[in-house]
Image: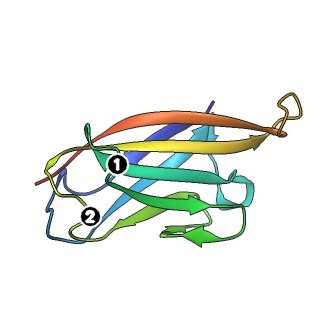
Amino acid sequence: MATVLIGGNTKIRGLDADSTLEFYIRAGSVLPLAVMPPFDVEIYVENRESENVDCSFDGTTKTNCTITEAGAVTCYIPSGSYSVSGKLYMKLTTYNPNENFADGTCDDIIIVDTEYRKE
């Protein structure tokens, strides 16, 4: 089971401004890039899961995000991504190798209230 730590310098993000969401994935300690599992992230406004911003890492390629060697993941949220304001939620799915599952991975899902708002 991974734990997600969210960071940033302001809790209010404008609907009409580009913004970022930074987080770390932990499994006891922060996972550095060298051992980070593949993941998918959906960032959405509360009760509006259909309007989301996606970022992902497939083990080699980063899409709509950057990852530092120390494991800081930054997802990029373009202005105008959401039609309504409200609390931002993040759904993180990590894909961890596990031979006990038919597809060979344990798809671990965590939904996080980021404590940020788009206004």
Image-quadrant location for residue 90: top left
Tell me which residue sits at (14%, 69%) in the image.
16
Q: Amino acid at mark 1?
A: Ser
Q: In this rendering, would 82 be left or right of 40? A: left
Q: Which residue is found at the position 50% from the left and 49% from the top?
A: 24
Residue 81 bears which disc, if any? Answer: 2
Q: Secondary structure at mark 2?
A: loop
Residue 105 percent location from the top left of the image: 78, 39
Q: Are marks 1 and 2 in contact (CB under 8 Å)?
A: no
Image position, residue 113 (x, y; %): 32, 36
Outermost residue toward the front? 50
Residue 61 left/right relative to 101: left
Count of numbered marks: 2
Q: Quadrant of residue 15?
A: bottom left
User: Residue at point 34% right, 48% down?
Assistant: 50
**What is the CA distance from the residue labelled 1 to the residue labelled 2?**
11 Å
Q: Note whether 74 is above or below 101 in the view shown.
A: below
Dividing the picture into quadrants, the one containing residue 9 is bottom left
In the rendered structure, find residue 100 and report the number of the disc placed on it: none
Of 80 and 72, nearer the camera is 80
Which residue is painted at 17% across and 71% down in the image? 17
Secondary element under disc 1, as helix, strand or loop, is loop
| Quarter the N terminus occupies | top right
